[in-house]
Structures are given as C-alpha cells and as structure tokens.
C-alpha cells in the first residue's frame, strides 16, 4: 500500500507496479489496434462482401471511406471518455473502451453480406465501425496518461513508448492472424474460401483477446496523480469548459493538433495503411506478400518506438519528433517510387517506356471519384478514364478539340473510346466492357503487367524502403504520448489531450487511404495521392519548429 497525505490524514491507495501498469495498458491497447487493423487490412475483401452492388472502383473507395468512418467518430469518443476519465478516473474509462471495441469487432465477424441482406449489410457494418471508432477515441488517451502518471519523470518517454508499441503489436498480430487464416483456409477449403467466409475468422478471434485484456485491466488500481488530485478536492467539474473554453488551454490543444498530430496522423497512416493500398491496387502485389512485408515492418517498428521514446528522455521530445517529421517529408515521394521499382519493375519500366495518355475534351470529363456509386460515367472521356483507373495505371491528361471523342493512347497504340450517354443500362455496360477490353489489350501489349511478378521482386530492398518510412513514423510517435501528457494539467489532461490526438489520427490519418486513393482516381497519377500527407506533415514541421514548447522534465502535478 502507498499513502497519500491530505491535511495530515493518511489515505491508503493500492500501489501497482510500473511493469504491471505498462503491460496491462499496452495489452489492452494492442487488442484495440488489432481490431482496427484487421478491418484496414481486409478492405479489398470487405468492399466485395458489403459493397458488391457498386462498381469495382466505387466499392473500393466506399470501403476505404468506411475505414475512415471509424476514425471520424474517434474525437467524439475522446470527448465522452475524456470527461469520464477526468471526473471519475482513468481506469474505469479505458476499461469500458476495450469492452466496447471488442464487441463491435466480433459483431463484424457475424454480419450478413450484401448478397444476403442487401442494404442492411453495409448499414450494420457502418454501425460497427462507428462503435469501434467511438471506443478507440477514449482508449489511447487513458492508456498513455495512466502509464505517464505512474512513470518516473526522467523515464516518461521510454515508459509511455511501450503504449506506442501496441500499434506495432496490434498490426503485427492482425497481419499474422490474417496470413495464417488465409493459408489454413486455402489449404483446407480451396483458394476462394477465404474471400467467401474465411475473412470472418480474424474478427471472431477478437473474443478471446478481449477476455484477456479485460482480465488484465481489472487488476489495475487508479493512477496516483489522479488519486492525489481527487484527494485534494481539485478535480475538474467541467473539463470541457476548462480545456476548450479557456484560451491558454485551447491554445495548447491547437498547438498539439497542428504542431504534432497532423504529421503523426498523416505520416503514420501513410506508412502502415496507405502503403498497403498502394501495393495492392497499383503495384498489383499479392496480398500474402504485402502481409509479409508489413509484418516485417511492424516487427521492426516495435523497438524503435521505445528507442525514440528513450532518446526523447535524453534529448527532448521536440528535436526527436522534428527529425521524424523532416525525414517523412523528404521520403514520401522517393519511397513510393522506389517501391514501384522494387516490387513491380515491369510496371515502372512500362510507365517509362510506354506512357499512357487520355486525350479528351475537358468538358466531356467528370471527376473520377464516386464513393456512393451513383455517377454513371458514360461519356467517352469518363469511360476511357474509368477503364484506365480500374487498371491501376498512371495516365496523363491531354486536352482534345471541343466536341471530339476521347482516345486512350498506350505508346503508339490509340484506342478510341465510345459514348454511352442515353443508352439503356445493359447496352451502356456492354459499351464500357468493349472499351475496357481493348484498353487492357493495349496495356498488355505495352508491357503493363496484370500483376507483379514474384520472380522480379526485390523484397529486401522493398523492406529497406519501408524501414525508412518506419523510422520516420516511429520517431514522431515514440515520444508523442509523453509530450502530450506533459502539455496539459492533470485536472483536464484526459479530455484536452484526447481530442487533438484523435482529430489528428482520426480525421487526418484515418482518411489518408480514402483521400489519397480518391486523388489518384481523380488525377490519374498513382503518386498524386501523396500530396495529402505531404501537406499536413509540412504544416506540422513549421508549427512544431516555431511554436511548440519543449516539455521534457515538466512536473505532472499541475
């Protein structure tokens, strides 16, 4: 038993060892990340299962948007559980979040498909994603604060970095379960069984992980800093008003969001999520190979979080995070170009030797972005661009004389597109299929591969490219928890730090795959989506360098 003195009266408080605190907090957060990452890694299959009524590209964008929907509700969860955590205690808040997250994930595993339940299937899936995002919004802040308020001041970065490793362990666990399930189901039931029903198993596995996480967290006691604050009668009665209604606190919230969280959200989710979309959709790499690469990247990231957290205890939070941001900014475009050369060199060679151009009247072209599948895309330009976008190939837009029909030029081969406006749906569909078939033939003749050739892959070099991105992402994320905890006073810490964290990761980071893929579909260049994370990271670099204060060594009993 530890004791807290309040006006000379000792108050017993159950002590919990730092190792137990870290283990229970990281285990629960790992489980919640596992739940979220299973969905992100199975986006392609989920789009076919729950959005089979939409065209291919629209269904894929809708699934990516749904992935982002879970993040959309994270700030709401942050506010709700932040208020609970600041008023009633850290332990209870993040005990509820892990139970809610686990129930929603298990629910996804038993949902009916679109073919079985129609529109009710995606509607129920949206509800489960909302519950997941709501729960995860309250999880991270509670875990990070709980560990920080137990840790020694000179080891806060290293201790809280173990909470950051939960993202790596969650991603690694999710990819491992998916890979093993894919192999086992494929071997026992055939190559199509995983896509048909085997994908549900990783979601159902979460029930066992949930039980373990709840058991570990039930053994924890309340955070000592919170207990001292409550014993002194200094708890926040109105944490929202204090955190966001008082300019000194609101200014810190904004600085945390723009100076750190924009870069963390954009960079981390580009490194661990959008890169999977890029490899699968554009580089045509097999899912098993992608899983293997991402598992290796996740495994490599785990010790790096702790390393950079430890370095921040020595050098300061700000210089370590700035290093990560600057490296990410410099690496975005070169890294993705390098992935093309190492994983699908035939594609890189074809793009250099046989460029694709869509020659069309700009007035005849629509924005190639349809997340709800309502646009028909039946003009000659739309049909041409849809065919090339569905093939995952970069193309250049060339303006044609007004009124002229669109053409697709693959090297020296020109394919005229057709106009299907005003035609019956079945006839328009046949017209689109005819044009798409001719474009695919021309792409094949021009050397564009339908999938990446494993014999030509340089997986070691590809891992080296991913490792550069991983180093940048972990340098930002490793010291992040300590920095955010140290920025805010105890009485409003849960509420104030959870909101910028979840806006940055939820709204900026969570929508990276959706927004970047949509930009590519609209613009035509497979690398153009990277401007989204680049812009947010650049904004953070400037803000962090000029305005964010150093927090290392700050006392938490404020």
Image (spheres, rainbow, N blue to C red):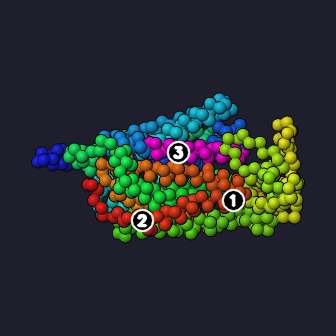
Residue 450 falls inside the magenta stretch: no
Helix, strand or loop at mark 2: loop
- Asked if the residue under mark 2 is in contact with the one under mark 3, i.e. CB atoms within 8 Å, the reply is no
Label drawn at residue 72: 3
Q: Residue at x 38, y 59 (%)?
A: 483
The picture places residue 10, in percent across and down from the top left corner, at: 14, 46
Residues under labels 2 and 1: Cα distance? Answer: 35 Å
Taking 8 as reference, is 445 above or below it? below
Among numbered discs 3 and 2, the one appearing first in the sequence: 3
Residue 63 falls inside the magenta stretch: yes
The picture places residue 23, in percent across and down from the top left corner, at: 37, 50
Q: Residues within 10 Å of mark 1 (few under 14, many from 20)?
A: many
Q: Residue at x 73, y 55 (%)?
A: 392
Residue to which mark 2 is pinned: 547
Residues under labels 3 and 2: Cα distance? Answer: 27 Å
Instruction: Please indicate, yes or no, whether residue 76 appears anywhere in the rendered image.
Output: yes
Residues under labels 1 and 3: Cα distance? Answer: 25 Å
If the image is split into quadrants, where does the C terminus sit?
bottom left
Helix, strand or loop at mark 3: helix
Q: Which residues are magenta?
A: 56-77
- Which residue occupies the foreground of this view, 526 or 535? 535
Among numbered discs 2 and 1, the one appearing first in the sequence: 1
Q: Residue at x 70, y 53 (%)?
A: 521
- Which residue occupies the foreground of this view, 225 or 222? 225
Q: Nearer the viewer, mark 1 or mark 3?
A: 3
The picture places residue 187, in percent across and down from the top left corner, at: 65, 44
From the viewer's perspective, is 80 left or right of 88? right
Q: Residue at x 48, y 48 (%)?
A: 33
- Asked if the residue under mark 1 is in contact with the one under mark 2, i.e. CB atoms within 8 Å, the reply is no
Label drawn at residue 526: 1
- Which residue occupies the foreground of this view, 187 or 523? 523
Helix, strand or loop at mark 1: loop
């Amino acid at each position: 038993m530890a004791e807290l003195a309040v006006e000379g009266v000792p108050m017993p408080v159950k002590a919990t060892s730092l190792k137990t605190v870290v283990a229970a907090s990281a285990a629960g957060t790992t489980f919640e990340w596992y739940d979220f990452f299973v969905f992100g890694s199975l986006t392609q299959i989920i789009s076919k299962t729950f959005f089979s009524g939409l065209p291919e590209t629209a269904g894929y964008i809708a699934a990516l948007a749904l992935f982002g929907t879970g993040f959309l509700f994270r700030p709401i969860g942050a506010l709700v559980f932040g208020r609970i955590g600041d008023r009633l205690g850290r332990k209870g808040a993040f005990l509820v979040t892990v139970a809610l997250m686990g129930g929603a994930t298990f629910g996804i595993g038993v949902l009916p498909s679109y073919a079985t339940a129609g529109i009710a299937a995606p509607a129920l899936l949206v509800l489960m994603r909302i519950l997941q995002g709501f729960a995860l919004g309250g999880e991270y802040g509670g875990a990070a604060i709980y560990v920080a308020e137990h840790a020694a001041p000179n080891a806060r970065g290293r201790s809280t970095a173990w909470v950051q490793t939960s993202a790596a362990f969650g991603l690694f666990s999710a990819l491992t379960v998916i890979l093993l399930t894919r192999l086992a189901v494929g071997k026992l039931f055939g190559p199509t069984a995983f896509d048909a029903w085997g994908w549900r198993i990783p979601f159902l596995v979460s029930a066992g992980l949930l039980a373990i996480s709840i058991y570990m967290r039930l053994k924890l006691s309340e955070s000592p800093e919170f207990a001292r604050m409550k014993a002194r009668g200094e708890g926040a009665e109105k944490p929202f008003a204090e955190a966001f209604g008082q300019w000194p606190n609101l200014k810190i919230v904004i600085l945390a969001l723009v100076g750190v969280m924009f870069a963390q959200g954009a960079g981390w989710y580009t490194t661990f999520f959008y890169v999977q979309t890029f490899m699968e959709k554009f580089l045509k790499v097999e899912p098993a190979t992608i899983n293997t690469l991402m598992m290796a990247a996740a495994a490599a990231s785990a010790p790096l979080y702790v390393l950079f957290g430890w370095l921040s205890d020595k050098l300061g939070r700000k210089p370590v995070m700035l290093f990560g941001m600057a490296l990410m900014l410099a690496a975005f475009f070169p890294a993705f170009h390098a992935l093309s050369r190492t994983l699908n060199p035939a594609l890189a060679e074809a793009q250099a030797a046989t460029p694709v151009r869509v020659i069309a009247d700009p007035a005849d072209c629509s924005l190639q972005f349809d997340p709800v599948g309502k646009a028909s895309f039946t003009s000659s330009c739309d049909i041409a661009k849809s065919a090339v976008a569905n093939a995952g190939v970069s193309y250049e837009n060339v303006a044609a004389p007004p009124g002229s029909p669109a053409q697709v030029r693959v090297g020296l081969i020109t394919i005229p597109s057709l106009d299907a406006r005003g035609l019956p749906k079945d006839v328009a569909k046949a017209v689109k299929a005819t044009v798409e078939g001719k474009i695919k033939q021309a792409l094949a003749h021009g050397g564009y591969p339908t999938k990446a050739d494993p014999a030509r892959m340089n997986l070691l070099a590809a891992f080296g490219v991913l490792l550069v991105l991983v180093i940048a992402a972990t340098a930002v994320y490793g010291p992040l928890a300590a920095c955010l905890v140290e920025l805010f006073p105890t009485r409003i810490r849960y509420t104030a730090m959870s909101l910028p964290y979840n806006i940055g990761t939820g709204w900026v980071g969570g929508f990276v795959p959706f927004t970047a893929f949509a930009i590519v579909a609209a613009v035509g260049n497979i690398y153009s989506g990277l401007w989204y994370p680049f812009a947010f990271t650049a904004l953070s670099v400037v803000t962090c360098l000029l305005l964010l204060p150093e927090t290392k060594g700050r006392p938490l009993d404020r």
